[in-house]
Image (cartoon, rainbow, N blue to C red):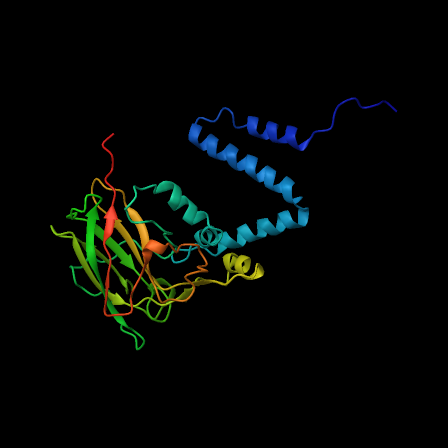
Amino acid sequence: MTENSSEAMTPEAHLAEVLAAYDNSPNPRLAEITKALIRHLHEFVAEVGLTREEWFAGIEVLTRTGQMCDDQRQEFILLSDTIGVSMLVEMINHVAAEGSTEPTVFGPFHVEGAPHRVIGESIITDSMDDDREVTFAGRVLGLDSNPIEGATLDVWETASNGFYDVQDGSQTPMNMRGIFTTGSDGAYEIKGIRPVPYQIPGDGPAGDLLFENGRHNWRPGHMHFVVAAADHKTVITHLFDAASDYLDSDAVFGVRDSLVVDMSGDRCDYDFVLEAVSAN
């Protein structure tokens, strides 16, 4: 027999070969992201000693995740939420000055085209027996404490049955949603309900990952806000009910102490503070 003098390919050499294939990408940022993803995936596979069966199980999970996505449900966002990636993206992309409102996760249930409502209007289209009405009020301010005129607050929450309108065919579309615009005093006032804890969908891969790791799929009661104003950083955030269950075990890691407020009365007061965008 003739001795084969060539060296066997190593995992390190294989990774180098794969990365080199992306060296001539015409899109530098895409190449940066792709190569970093490849490096981390190869390191992950090597670290855990991934078996063929486990690799294929992962492929099946991703396939099922895609199959569950539609106009009303984004299972990939749910997966991202439940492993803390969504919150990390917000933390990286919203590095704001001290004193500005903290961000949290966007979530999979925002809907474009919510109705524009006047200050003080209710977002409740469908009343339910368990509704506990609360007025959310305050101002949108700059870091200098001056009010911001023309700021928009895109808000949404579940009905008191724990479902968003897009999850519940019995609700009128755009129930519990609205967009409000501040006047010269920066004030907003929104009539909604006291938020209730609810379960994120648990019948898909995101739920499987939670349950098989001994976690639950509950979120504490909260109202969603996207607060935006010209020449200021937009903040995607929530207000959480201080008396809600699951504040210390939110399924998507979104709770921040500064966003936990008293909702025990008929009115919840909170000022949103936006950082101005640098002119440079």
Residue 126 visible in the current orientation: no
Q: Is 239 displayed left or right of 217 in the figure? A: left
Q: Residue at x 44, y 59 (%)?
A: 250
Residue 10 visible in the current orientation: yes
> Up-down: is 33 above or below 228?
above
Q: Out of 220 and 128, give the one closest to the viewer.
A: 220
Q: Is 176 displayed left or right of 64 in the figure? A: left
Quarter of the image for residue 270 reads bottom left
Quarter of the image for residue 187 reads bottom left
> Up-down: is 36 above or below 203?
above
Position of the N terminus, as image quadrant, is: top right
Q: Which x, y percent locates residue 191?
A: 22, 65
> Up-down: is 159 above or below 10?
below
For this orientation, the residue located farthest to the left is 184
For this orientation, the residue located farthest to the bottom is 129
Q: Which x, y percent locates residue 18?
A: 59, 30
Q: Which x, y percent locates residue 114?
A: 25, 57
> Up-down: is 274 above or below 253?
above
Q: Residue at x 52, y 61 (%)?
A: 215
